[in-house]
Amino acid sequence: MVLIVVIDRDGYKDSYDGTVDLIDSIYYATVTLTTTGYGDITPVTPAARLVNAFIVTPLRISFLVVLVGTTLEVLANEGRRIMRDTRWRKRMRDHTIVVGYGTKGRSAVQTLISNGVKRDGIVVIDPRAQAVGDAGNDQMAAFHGDATNRTVLRRAEVMTAREVIVTTDRDDSAVLVTLAVRQLNPNAHIVVAVREEDNVPLLRQSGADAVVTSSEAVGRLLGLSAVSPNLGEVMEDLLTYGDGLEVAERPVLGREVGKPPSALPDRVVSVVRDGKVHRYYDSNVSVLAAGDKLIVVRPAKETPWAERPGAEDDDE
């Protein structure tokens, strides 16, 4: 529009000095398109008035359409987000929050789902828009933002979460997230992945219930594979869910009470009693008791205990 006015500047009149130059053209285009229009510069010739009627006016309308349309779109999206958040908060309790939807976060989510956790009970927080979109495509609630920000954690209802899994890319961010989560929810079970072993005590002091050193675990697996390829293959099999062998936790069945761990058909690795993990050969768990839980190695395709026929009767 500035170009149109400059080319036909003789058809316009400035009430200040009578002539229209480049600066006047910029000023006229600005106030006209924004519909401000002070009337100090006006088209006076028929040609300039026709241009205003058939070119400038459509440009002005287009500007208003874009302005109003963009504003309405932003307001509508924000309104829908608020409504979704409100409905989601009403029904979300005892859920699992996963901070970071990268490689570690995806693997953690897949393991949760494979062990019976429903997708609508998992909430993802990630500062990357692409990761949030991927979590949404995987049918999970996702929030875009930095989990070190307590406002973002509150939006994810961390106060009522049962478990929080932290898989950030940096250990310092993991510490800040852990501190924030523990402050907002003293009862949540917090599992954190860190890169450096030296940061494990710091994470535990920050409130983490379990800390996994990713770099050390990978290094050990690499060392085992180098020393004994067969042992490395077995360890990788145990860590890969859904194929071959897997490590799982299940409760002691009613018919198993009073028996030693070695008498069970499952390969018992550990026994959990009163919240403490005992090795299968520990004399304190030489005989299984009601309420114990077993850490077993079993075929990956074996039917989970909760889905077995008569599992409830066995538990009783």
Image: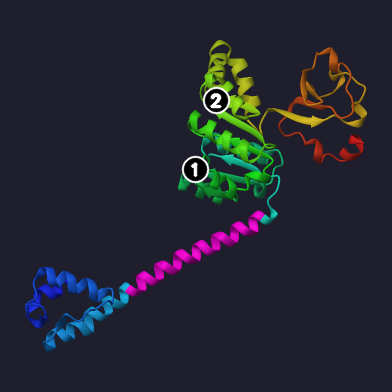
| Quadrant where the image shows the C terminus | top right
| Left or right: 134 as drawn, with respect to 56 | right
| Quadrant where the image shows the N terminus | bottom left
Label ID, residue 146: 1
Query: Which residue is at 62% across, 29% downward?
Result: 208
- Element class at badge 1: loop
| Left or right: 34 as drawn, with respect to 8 | right
Query: Which residue is at 69% across, 54% downward?
Result: 91
Answer whether labels 1 and 2 touch (C-beta < 8 Å): no
**Label 1 amino acid?**
Asp
The reply to whether residue 1 is in sight is no
Query: Which residue is at 23% across, 76% downward?
Result: 32
Query: Which residue is at 54% across, 47% downward?
Result: 151
Q: Is residue 67 magenta?
A: yes
Bounds of the magenta span?
Answer: 64-89
- Which residue position holds label 2? 214
**Label 2 amino acid?**
Ser
Q: Tell me the quarter of the picture where residue 60 sits.
A: bottom left
Q: Between tags 1 and 2, which lies in front?
A: 1
